[in-house]
Amino acid sequence: MIHPNPYTDVPTSDFDPYTTEVLANPYPHYEQLRELGTWAWLERYGVLAVARHDEVQRILSQPDVFCSSAGVGLANFHTEAPWRKPSIILEADPPHHSRTRKVVARVLSPVSIGRLRATFEDVAARMVDSLVERGSFDAAKDLCEAFPIKAFGDAVGLPAEGREHLLPYGDMVFNGFGPINERFQARMDSSGEAVNWIARVCQRDALTKDGLGAQLFAAADAGEIGHDEAGMLVRTLLSAGLDTTVFTLCNAITCFARHPEQWALLREDPSLARQALEEVLRFDSTFHSFYRTSTQDVELGGITVKAGQKIVVFIASANRDPRRWPNADRFDITRRATGHMAFGTGIHGCAGQMMARLEGEIVLTALARRVASFRLDGEPVQHFNNTVRGLKHMPVTVEPLLATVD
Ligand code: OVM
């Protein structure tokens, strides 16, 4: 179906962000979109699109005008039934959002996250040691999936059994922000068990007594949120916290396998791991796009956006906008990548970003201490998802670094 463009000053585009061809390499398409103008009308979906850094930032900085409660996917919750109960943090506006966000922000604060460092480092060191010993392995499965499932899963307080449901569940959530296409439907059809398992581990008695999940329930005991809301926020941790970090690690290793001179820089100075991760997030953002909905007629970027308008926000494109980044298409871990919007920005900016950074830094540091170089044994196999970009498989052979005393 084609949706006629109601905005006379906005160019119409037949761009479809959700085709396999676009998902395989969206960057040339983003460039075209940015060059088309400040705004584009995507006639296939009947939405406005922004792809430049400046407008993306402006939209995300006005959460009262560009709201989240109508859903942050293509579906408009005001006119269509959401496929699952809306998230009480992601798909909510102030003042409701402020209350849940405050609790989650505390549970995921730098202080709270800092307590996990030693354990995470230990998990990463063991995994990387055994993989380097093997020499050849599937970096996507054996490291990028294995690490968050173990380290983050333990941190939340999940049972060991059933964690194989985490990624399929997340895959459904992130497909669900796009259109109800075959990709979403295929995942939905096979995810009944995953949905049931997630529902079960969002209950207090399924979780350890000392994990992040338990801390959410403690906030309920303190009267800050309801006990049902604590369970909903555990669901948020499990929806948002796995596929994202897994794919970020995949993208990081791909970047370094393809840019060996950048790996050499990190290897020589592993303290660059944190800023290297920021550059990975800028250069190959994990989360590509989400939506906002205008609550009123509003002027932005030279047009009047009509009230109730769905707007798709391409954060991965903003992170490659040459108006903002010199040599935007160059992967360079020495650049200042701060200001990227891979975690979004504003009041809805990723609540787990400190966790993501900790996991990324620790895995990259562990690798930098033990791996001289990566060789891709064949093309990595992409994981296609409507919203997040990552890999299913990445067969690699690593050349070990000779042991050094440090
Ligand atoms: C949630 C949720 C799910 C997916 C992503 C996300 C990026 C949040 O359930 O709250 O944030």
Image (tube, grey):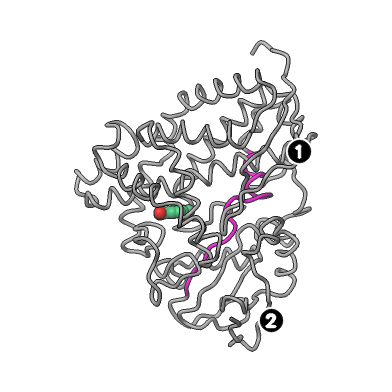
* Mark 2–mark 1 CB contact (< 8 Å): no
Left or right of residue 317: residue 347:
left
Residue 210, how many percent across, how many down? 30, 31
Residue 404, how many percent across, how many down? 69, 12
Residue at the location (37% across, 50% down)? 195
Q: Nearer the viewer, residue 39 or 228?
A: 228
Q: Which residues are magenta?
A: 275-293
Marked residue nearer the N-terminal end (2 or 1): 2
Left or right of residue 310: residue 104:
left
Q: Residue type at mark 1?
A: Gly
Q: Is residue 335 above or below residue 77?
A: above
> Which residue is disc 1 drawn over?
378
Residue at the location (47% across, 54% down)? 172
Residue 151, how many percent across, how many down? 46, 31
Q: Residue type at mark 2?
A: Pro
Q: Is residue 146 above or below residue 225?
A: above
Q: Secondary structure at mark 1?
A: loop
Ligand 1, by image quadrant, is bottom left
Q: CA distance from mark 2 to mark 1?
A: 40 Å
| 290 part of magenta stretch | yes
Quadrant (top left, top right, bottom left, bottom right) of the C terminus: top right
